[in-house]
């Protein structure tokens, strides 16, 4: 049985009720952050949301073999302790005790024993007995007393738990993503990804909102889904899906030579061709040499905006802009010719 088929067939444990909107927002923001971190490495992946756990990460979009289960647990204050991690609270409208956070994670470890990679609690607060460092930490690095405390609590909750066997699956991911501004933080990270792909960070919030909306759509129950193919299409968000989002976004946000070329006809074929070639070079430089351009591009944009604003004669405004910014460009590249300066102006003007 394949990994996705097992996810589809395995009965879900009972849910604890509706999830607060704020926590869901945080959960999707962290999921997108993780997704984009994998995407920029070129690694294949797939994600599911609200399926057996808050987030499921598969190691390949077409032929997955392993699953990482992420349970997102935010706290307003107070660090994590082994006691909090294994605490069981009374079930609402009942006399029994519900599963602890560790117990819920163990449920997935046991049920998906053939394909689980690890079970991770993602949290905005550390567990000092484990580590106070940001990042993911395996619970096997707990001190001896904490290991013993966790093992005793889990054995009492579920007799099938064996510390030596099951604890290596447990991880805690202490994330610096702040609960109150997670959305803005991830939008900034989206902007970095978009810039590397398209040469422009424009539309980062729009892209984030679109991807977040797709995550939410994939998370919704689909009672009509019956077949594995339908389940895959309805609930699994893959690398190729995100790639499609990036491609479409790039088509609409990247400066385009085709948009400016018609306005340059008065310059003649030879000059326009030189500017076009310089445009291509600058577009590459902007993606590969941004560290050297990061202070130049904004200066060009600021200088040319008042020159073009409200002007009827585009060519005359362009010539004035070349004179205005040539010193800025030459400070970056002393050998830059007029075609290069013109191309940089056209590119930055279109980005505004």
Image (spheres, helix red, strand yellow):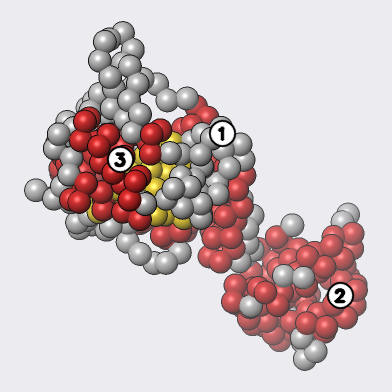
Element class at badge 1: loop
Q: Position of residue 156 (x, y in %)?
A: 21, 31
Above/below status of 5 relative to 251: above
Q: Which residue position holds label 2?
A: 325
- First-in-chain label (2 vs 1): 1
Are the residues at dot 1 and dot 3 in contact (C-beta closer than 8 Å)?
A: no
In the image, is 21 to the left or to the right of 218? right
Few, some or many residues within 10 Å of mark 1 (<14, 14–19, 20+): few
Q: Residue at x 27, y 58 (%)?
A: 60
Q: Is residue 249 visible?
A: no
Q: Which residue position holds label 1?
A: 77
Q: Is residue 341 visible?
A: yes
Q: Residue at x 32, y 30 (%)?
A: 100
Q: Position of residue 289 (x, y in %)?
A: 64, 78
Q: Please identify, in this view, whether the residue under mark 2 or under mark 1 is nearer the observer.
A: 1
- First-in-chain label (1 vs 3): 1
Above/below status of 18 relative to 130: above
Q: Position of residue 350 (x, y in %)?
A: 71, 61
Q: Position of residue 86 (x, y in %)?
A: 33, 33
Few, some or many residues within 10 Å of mark 2 (<14, 14–19, 20+): many
Task: Measure the C-alpha gap from mark 1 to mark 3.
Answer: 22 Å
- First-in-chain label (2 vs 3): 3
Q: Which residue position holds label 3?
A: 150
Q: Nearer the viewer, residue 344 or 146?
A: 146
Quadrant hosting residue 335: bottom right
Quadrant hosting residue 7: top left
Q: Among all residues in the image, which is located at the extreme bottom?
A: 335
Q: Nearer the viewer, residue 312 or 162?
A: 162
Q: Nearer the viewer, residue 34 or 277?
A: 34
Above/below status of 274 relative to 261: below
Element class at badge 2: helix
């Amino acid at each position: 049985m394949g990994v996705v088929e097992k996810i589809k067939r395995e009965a879900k444990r009972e849910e604890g009720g509706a999830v607060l909107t704020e926590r869901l927002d945080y959960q999707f923001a962290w999921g997108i952050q993780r997704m984009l971190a994998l995407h920029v490495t070129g690694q294949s992946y797939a994600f599911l949301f609200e399926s057996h756990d808050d987030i499921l990460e598969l190691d390949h979009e077409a032929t997955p073999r392993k699953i990482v289960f992420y349970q997102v647990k935010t706290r307003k204050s107070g660090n994590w302790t082994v006691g909090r991690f294994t605490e069981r609270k009374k079930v609402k409208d009942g006399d029994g005790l519900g599963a602890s956070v560790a117990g819920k994670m163990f449920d997935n470890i046991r049920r998906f024993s053939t394909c689980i990679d690890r079970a991770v609690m993602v949290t905005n607060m550390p567990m000092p007995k484990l580590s106070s460092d940001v990042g993911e930490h395996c619970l096997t690095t707990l001190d001896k007393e904490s290991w013993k405390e966790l093992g005793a609590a889990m054995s009492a909750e579920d007799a099938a738990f064996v510390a030596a066997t099951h604890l290596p699956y447990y991880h805690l991911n202490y994330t610096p993503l702040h609960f109150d501004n997670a959305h803005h933080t991830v939008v900034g990270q989206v902007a970095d990804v978009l810039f590397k792909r398209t040469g422009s960070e424009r539309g980062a919030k729009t892209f984030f909102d679109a991807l977040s909306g797709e995550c939410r759509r994939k998370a919704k129950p689909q009672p009509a889904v019956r077949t594995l193919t339908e389940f895959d299409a309805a609930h699994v968000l893959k690398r190729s899906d995100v790639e499609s989002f990036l491609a479409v976004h790039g088509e609409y946000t990247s400066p385009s030579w085709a948009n400016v070329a018609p306005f340059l006809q008065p310059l003649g074929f030879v000059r326009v061709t030189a500017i076009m070639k310089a445009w291509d070079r600058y577009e590459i430089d902007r993606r590969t040499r941004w560290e050297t351009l990061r202070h130049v591009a904004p200066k060009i944009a600021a200088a040319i905006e008042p020159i073009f604003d409200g002007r009827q004669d585009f060519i005359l405004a362009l010539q004035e802009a070349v004179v205005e910014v040539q010193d800025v460009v030459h400070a970056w590249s002393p050998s830059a010719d007029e075609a290069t300066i013109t191309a940089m102006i056209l590119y930055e003007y279109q980005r505004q």
